[in-house]
Amino acid sequence: ETGVTQTPRHLVMGMTNKKSLKCEQHLGHNAMYWYKQSAKKPLELMFVYNFKEQTENNSVPSRFSPECPNSSHLFLHLHTLQPEDSALYLCASSQGDGVDTQYFGPGTRLTVL
Amino acid sequence: AQSVAQPEDQVNVAEGNPLTVKCTYSVSGNPYLFWYVQYPNRGLQFLLKYITGDNLVKGSYGFEAEFNKSQTSFHLKKPSALVSDSALYFCAVPPNTGNQFYFGTGTSLTVIP
């Protein structure tokens, strides 16, 4: 295990539902990340938080809303998603930003019906 | 701009044979290079990284990678492949500034018994 946990591991939701993904890191890191991994596409960085402050938002639609209450927890709130949002959502953490090694959680497999 | 390229989508190798997964890079400044592995239904797992120094970097599970500045390559290698090495492999390069790690498109390795 990498020290980064994600719940739930699988999620099926309708387009009108509201759900949240949770990530927790037990590594004492200061930076946390959300990535989207779709089949046949490169890994897409969505959001970055460094010391609880959002430092990057890669033009992600507003139907994805991140929340970072402290350096150990990261949430991704989902509402009115589209079927094309179905993907594996990965959380990662690192000691700092930039060149520090990122450690990934197991991911949440999201299916939007 | 930082980027990496993985020229092979798929690599097949017989168990016990040496394996190579290729990666080339394009960076400004000193190159920091990473390899990650992703097993089915799991997140990315850090294998090894090159920061500076010895061109041959040793990592987890018997993997190593050779940094070649003249060929701008950072190929992942293992002397004797195991069936359990079958997975998706990503090379990556961190940013000069900010948090945007640049991942390759991944190479699917299949080790045939």
Image (cartoon, coloured by chain):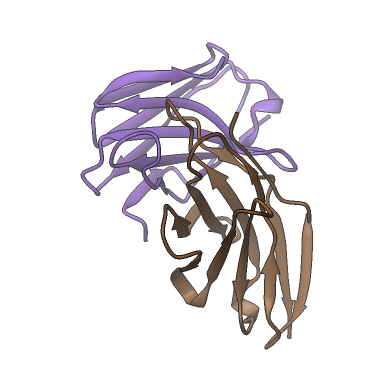
Report how many numbered discs are placed on residues in the image: 0
Q: Quadrant of the C terminus of chain A?
A: top right
- Residue at 78%, 52% in the rendered image: B7
Eyeballing the image, is A58 above or below A96?
A: above
Eyeballing the image, is A53 above or below A75?
A: above
- Residue at 78%, 72% in the rendered image: B12
- Residue at 26%, 24% in the rendered image: A52
Q: Quadrant of the N terminus of chain A?
A: bottom left
- x, y percent for residue B78: 60, 76
Chain A drawing hue:
purple
Chain B drawing hue:
brown
- x, y percent for residue A58: 54, 19
- x, y percent for residue A13: 58, 30
- Residue at 61%, 20% in the rendered image: A81
Q: Quadrant of residue A93?
A: top left
Q: Quadrant of residue A88?
A: top right
Give A26 or B63, whichever is nearer the viewer: B63
Give B89 or A72, whichever is nearer the viewer: B89
- x, y percent for residue B81: 64, 81
Does B105 sit left or right of A65 as displayed?
right
Give B8 or B40, whichever is nearer the viewer: B8
Does B18 sit left or right of B78 as displayed?
right
Does B9 sit left or right of B16 as displayed?
right
Eyeballing the image, is B52 above or below B112?
A: above
Q: Residue furthest top?
A: A62
Q: Residue furthest front?
A: B70
